[in-house]
């Protein structure tokens, strides 16, 4: 069992930055592909970014490319999401997720077995 705890959300003006962190329990963090998803009110949850087990490979949805950066520190069992140039449409609850299935960079919600409780990100215009 893996427990994931997100932090770093908050209220920011458009154009601002936030850094989300997700701390994972357990000693096998390096074996999990990790991802950030988000869910805005009235919308389905969508993937934002994913990172491979080593951290060498990443995926971003088109709307955040060039603005968001995902990274991980396997020594600290933590994955990060640096969000710059935030827009009001980035407002959502952001969730951290872990895939222990050995996939390279899974981007489907169904691939992820473990989820955090979510952290609210609100971007004002």
Image (cartoon, rainbow, N blue to C red):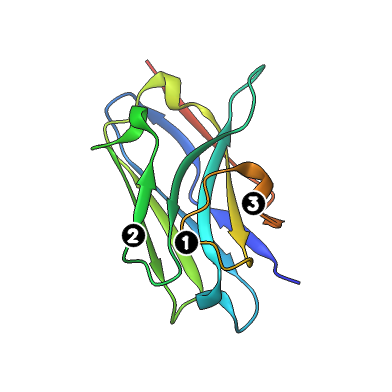
Indicate the secondary structure of the residue bearing disc 3.
helix
Indicate the secondary structure of the residue bearing disc 2.
loop
Q: Pointer 1: residues within 10 angstroms few (<14), some, or many (20+)?
A: some
Query: For this view, does 83 lie left or right of residue 9?
Result: left
Report how far apart the C-alphas of labels 2 and 3 lie in the structure. Answer: 17 Å
User: Which residue carries the number 2 mark?
Assistant: 57
Instruction: Determine the residue positioned at 26% across, 31% down.
Output: 85
Instruction: Determine the residue positioned at 29% across, 36% down.
Output: 65
For marks 2 and 3 on the same chain, the one whose residue lies earlier in the sequence: 2
Report how far apart the C-alphas of labels 1 and 2 lie in the structure. Answer: 8 Å
Answer yes or no: do the residues labelled 1 and 2 have beta carbons within 8 Å?
Answer: yes
For marks 1 and 3 on the same chain, the one whose residue lies earlier in the sequence: 1
Query: For this view, does 54 lie left or right of residue 119?
Result: left
Q: Name the quadrant of the C terminus.
A: top left
The correct choice, above or below, for 92 with respect to 59 in the image is: above
Q: Give me the disc on residue 30.
A: none
Query: For this view, does 49 lie left or right of residue 34?
Result: left
The x, y position of residue 39, in whole percent, is 60, 30
Instruction: Determine the residue positioned at 63% across, 67% down.
Output: 100
The x, y position of residue 94, in whole percent, is 56, 40
Name of the residue lying farthest toward the front: 103
Q: Name the quadrant of the N terminus.
A: bottom right
Q: Pointer 3: residues within 10 angstroms few (<14), some, or many (20+)?
A: some
Report how far apart the C-alphas of labels 1 and 3 lie in the structure. Answer: 11 Å
Q: Give me the disc on residue 111.
A: 3
Instruction: Determine the residue positioned at 55% across, 68% down.
Output: 32
Indicate the secondary structure of the residue bearing disc 1.
loop
Q: Nearer the viewer, mark 1 or mark 2?
A: 1
Q: Give me the disc on residue 104.
A: 1
The x, y position of residue 74, in whole percent, is 44, 77
Q: Quadrant of residue 72?
A: bottom left
The x, y position of residue 37, in whole percent, is 55, 41
């Amino acid at each position: 069992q893996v427990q994931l705890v997100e932090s770093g959300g908050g209220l920011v003006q458009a154009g601002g930055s936030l850094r989300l962190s997700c701390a994972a329990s357990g000693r096998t963090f390096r074996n999990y592909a990790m991802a950030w998803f988000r869910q805005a009110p009235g919308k389905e949850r969508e993937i934002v970014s994913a990172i491979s087990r080593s951290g060498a490979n990443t995926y971003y949805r088109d709307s955040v490319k060039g603005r968001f950066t995902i990274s991980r520190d396997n020594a600290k069992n933590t994955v990060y999401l640096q969000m710059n140039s935030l827009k009001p449409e980035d407002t959502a609850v952001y969730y951290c997720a872990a895939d222990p299935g050995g996939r390279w960079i899974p981007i489907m919600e169904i691939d992820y077995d473990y989820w955090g409780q979510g952290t609210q990100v609100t971007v004002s215009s």
